Amino acid sequence: MTAKHRIYTMTFSSVYPHLVAKAEKKGRTKEEVDQIIRWLTGYTPKKLASQIEKRVNLEEFFAQAPKLHPARQSITGVICGVRIEEIEDPLMREVRYLDKLIDELAKGRPMEKILRAESASPTAEAPQKTAAKKTPAKKTPAKTAKKTPAKAQVQAKAKAKATK
């Protein structure tokens, strides 16, 4: 039997300030961090505060979560050098989901996207994605025109290096 990872024994109340600090350093708020935590775990604001006060460890925090959001499984990507979808330990995956969501917040991603558009049905979301892809294509020439001199310089330098 393998020993528990030390992260499981850390109290949520010791991790929470780091999550908030990470977000606030990038101009986001504690309220947004709380919203993400509540979305992921199903805690009410009062229950979340209670869990922080009780100093429960991360294992208990996730085990006692009222309702883990079903859309959390759509969270993918790399966190700490590991693909979330490849993490086998369910508890470690939950911890990494939270970490990834806070990373997305700190990187400036809109809350609607972080919260997976409140888990709209895939069929309702598909037309939006298609429409979103068409809209930027119309704007591309204007953006390209503004950036052309800089792009041209970069491309010229790249060609010069390639020919040497």
Image: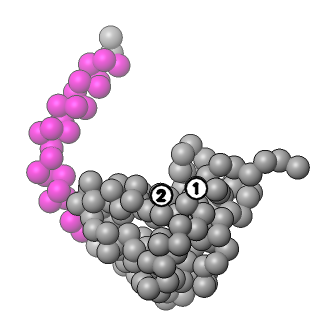
Q: Quadrant of the C terminus?
A: top left
Q: Position of residue 70 (x, y in %)?
A: 61, 80
Task: Give residue 151's quadrant in the image.
Answer: top left
Residue beneath the point at 18% across and 35% down: 152
Pointer 1: what residue?
A: 10
Task: Of the two numbered discs 1 and 2 on the same chain, state the one appearing first in sequence.
Answer: 1
CB atoms of marks 1 and 2 within 8 Å: yes
Q: Is residue 72 above or below residue 15?
A: below
Q: Which element is circle 2 on? A: helix
Task: Give residue 137's quadrant in the image.
Answer: bottom left
Q: Left or right of 93: which side holds 53?
A: left
What amino acid does circle 2 point to? Answer: Val
Q: Which residues are magenta?
A: 137-162
Q: Residues within 10 Å of mark 2 (few under 14, many from 20)?
A: some
Residue beneath the point at 29% across and 25% down: 158
Q: Which element is circle 1 on? A: loop
Which mark identifies residue 130? Answer: none
What amino acid does circle 1 point to? Answer: Met
Instruction: Work out whether residue 101 can be spotted.
Output: yes
For the residue pair 106 and 41, the one nearer the viewer reads as 41
Q: Left or right of 7: which side holds 132?
A: left
Which mark identifies residue 15? Answer: 2
